[in-house]
Amino acid sequence: MPYILILVAYLLGSISSAMITCRAMGLPDPRTTGSHNPGATNVLRIGGKKPAIITLLGDMLKGLLPVLLGKLWGLGDFWLFLIGFAALIGHMYPVFYQFKGGKGVATAIGVYLGIHFWAGVLVCLTWLFVAKGLKISSLSALIATLLAPLYFHLLTHDLSLSLGLLVMTALIWWRHRSNIRRMLDGSESIIKTDSRS
């Protein structure tokens, strides 16, 4: 049964919240404008707050729902991690979009919240604190996901889970390698508020 959930999580992760939201709201394809990333930050750039929030929630639910379903079936934390990881891989390499997807931060947060709510909250608060102070979405994501395995280890004392989450962190950092290059040369975009609803 866990293997079925892993497959379902991957397929759910492969559904692009950004693509669906932009199409429904008459916005440009997020893969062809802005940062060309089908994620909430790029949707914010091209469409404003409302579609960005919808995209963010959709991407989080892709990670959260299959993990919660695994919990209902009584699966342990490491199985929950594998299910969440499958959702993350689906988001990053979606079968429905030629395996070209987003960077996975919102989906990872959904996974974190599903496995251990309070550890997930700490990750969210870290993202918000860094984003508010430094105004760089990608840096906020990198710091929050870097600290995620530590938060989980402190709250769960589950080494295998923490090591699994470290693999998730490494993959998210790999997907942000272009952002890291831009941060190093000072050209990375900052978070801008938008008056559009």
Image (cartoon, rainbow, N blue to C red):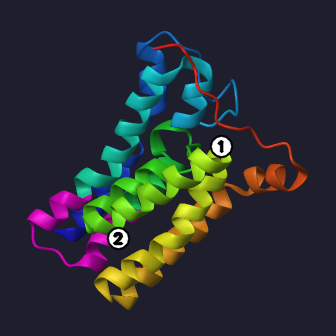
* Residue 36 appears left or right of 193: right
Instruction: Please indicate, yes or no, whether residue 15 appears anywhere in the rendered image.
Output: no
Residue at image location 52% in from the left, 72% down from the top:
147
Q: Most extreme residue toward the top, as rendered?
A: 26
Instruction: Please state which of residues 171 and 113 is positioned toward the viewer in this rendering.
Output: 113
Crowdedness near tag 2: few (<14), some (14–19) or many (≥20) residues, C-alpha within 10 Å: many
Instruction: Please state which of residues 32 and 98 is positioned toward the viewer in this rendering.
Output: 32
Residue corresponding to mark 2: 82
Q: Is residue 72 magenta?
A: yes
* Residue 92 appears left or right of 35: left
SS of the residue at dot 1?
Answer: loop
**Kind of residue indicated by mark 2:** Leu
**Kind of residue indicated by mark 1:** Lys
In the image, residue 158 lies at what x, y percent? 33, 88
Instruction: Please indicate, yes or no, whether residue 23 appears anywhere in the rendered image.
Output: yes
Residue 160 higher or lower than 64, as above or below? below
Write down the region rendered in magenta.
67-85
For the C terminus, the quadrant is top left
- Specify the quadrant of the image occupied by residue 46: top right
SS of the residue at dot 2?
Answer: helix
Residue at image location 48% in from the left, 23% down from the top:
49
Q: Is residue 78 magenta?
A: yes
Crowdedness near tag 1: few (<14), some (14–19) or many (≥20) residues, C-alpha within 10 Å: some
Residue 76 higher or lower than 175, as above or below? below
Question: Are circles 1 and 2 on residues that touch, CB within 8 Å?
Answer: no
Residue corresponding to mark 1: 135
